[in-house]
Every structure is written in C-alpha cells, then in structure tokens.
Image (tube, rainbow, N blue to C red):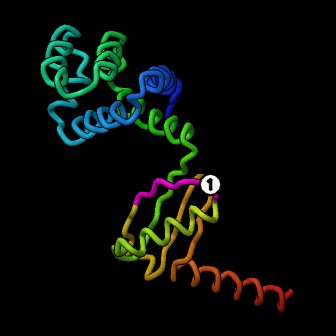
Amino acid sequence: MQDNRVARRYAQALFGTALKYDVVSSVESDLLAIDNLLYNDPEFREFVTAPYTSRDEKMAIIDRVFSDRITALTMQLLRVMLEKRREAEIPQVRREFVTLRREHEGVIHVTVTSAEVMPDDQRVALVARVSELLGKKLEPDYVVDPSLIGGVRVAYENYVLDGSARGALSKLRERLKYDLLKRLG
C-alpha cells in the first residue's frame, strides 16, 4: 500500500492557500495538465524524476516550460517539491488535492460503468437520479465494460449500485445456490 502522507501534506497546504486566494479550479487544472504531461511523455517524466539531473537544471526547465502556463501558486509548489526532492509525488498530490476539493464542496466521485457508451441524456438522467438518492452533488467518470452485457453499475465510496445484466445473473446464481443448499440441508 502506498504511503500518501507526504502528498496529503503538500495537497493540504496547496488547497488551503488556493482556497484563500480563490484559485482552486485553476490550480486543479494546472495539476491535471502537469500530471497528464508526466503520464503521457516518458522523456519528460524521466527528466523530472531522474536523480542524476541537477536540481538547478530541473528548475530552469520547469520555469521555462510552465512559468507562463500555470498559476504562480502551482509554480511555487513545483519549485518546493523539486527542492525537497519530492517530484515523484506530483501525481499523488494532484489526486489528494482533488479529494480535498471534493470533500470541501460536498461532492461524491462516482464511476458509472455501462456495457456501451451511454447517450448524454441517459447520463444526465442517471446522475440526477443517483444524486437525488444520495442527497449530494456527483462528479461522474464514465467507463465502458462490455462484460456487463447490459445495464449500468454505479460505484462510489465503498458502495456499488449494480443494475447490470451480469449483476442480475450473479444474484440469480447465488439465490439458486442458496435455495438448493437450503433444500439439501
């Protein structure tokens, strides 16, 4: 299991400051862009995380690449993380920052899984219905999984609302096993 304490501390400090200056959404966008660059560009990721590259060289490149594209607050975070040799923690800081923002706004992250791509009107209706059931605002991610056969599965926190054909078949199988064992016992 990964230790998130360091990333959580950086994210808490960043979130508190971003909230104070009302730049939470800008900082979150900055972190997402940086995380995407690290994920999608192996050369850049190698450069940033390589222990043999000097701090000064990393700082100069980071300044050149990001100084006019991200907020001053995010830039300061990058500088501090580079100075403290915490550059490998950047993706986790982004995840922790998003978690803090969701907690602050009372938003629940849900993953909606369907057998095929859902039309926008169905997405809106589903999210509205689940939001009404939970009494919270939702932030959905949509995933396509053909193994569901049909229907939808909504996962949030430690719960799963399974309305998929595969889930119904599993419930039926378990019910039949239970009934059979009950008759035999």
**Is residue 56 rendered to the left or right of residue 5?**
left
Q: Which residue is mark 1?
A: 158
**Residue 68 location, x and y as percent?**
16, 23
Horizontally, residue 70 falls left or right of residue 110, namely: left
Q: Residue at x 49, y 65 (%)?
A: 127
How far across and how far down the image is residue 12, in percent? 50, 24
Asked if the stretch drawn in magenta spans residue 138, the answer is: yes
Vertical relation: 99 (above or below) 180: above
Mark 1 surroundings within 10 Å by alpha-carbon count, few (fewer than 14), some (14 through 19), many (20 or more): few
Q: Position of residue 154 (x, y in %)?
A: 53, 65
**Residue farthest toward the right in the current orientation of the protein:** 185
Viewer-proximal residue among 42 and 160: 160
Q: Is residue 159 above or below residue 63?
A: below
Residue 118 higher or lower than 29, as above or below: below
* Dot 1 amino acid type: Asn
Please report the bounds of the magenta region as a residue range.
135-141
Which quadrant would residue 28 be assigned to in this image? top left
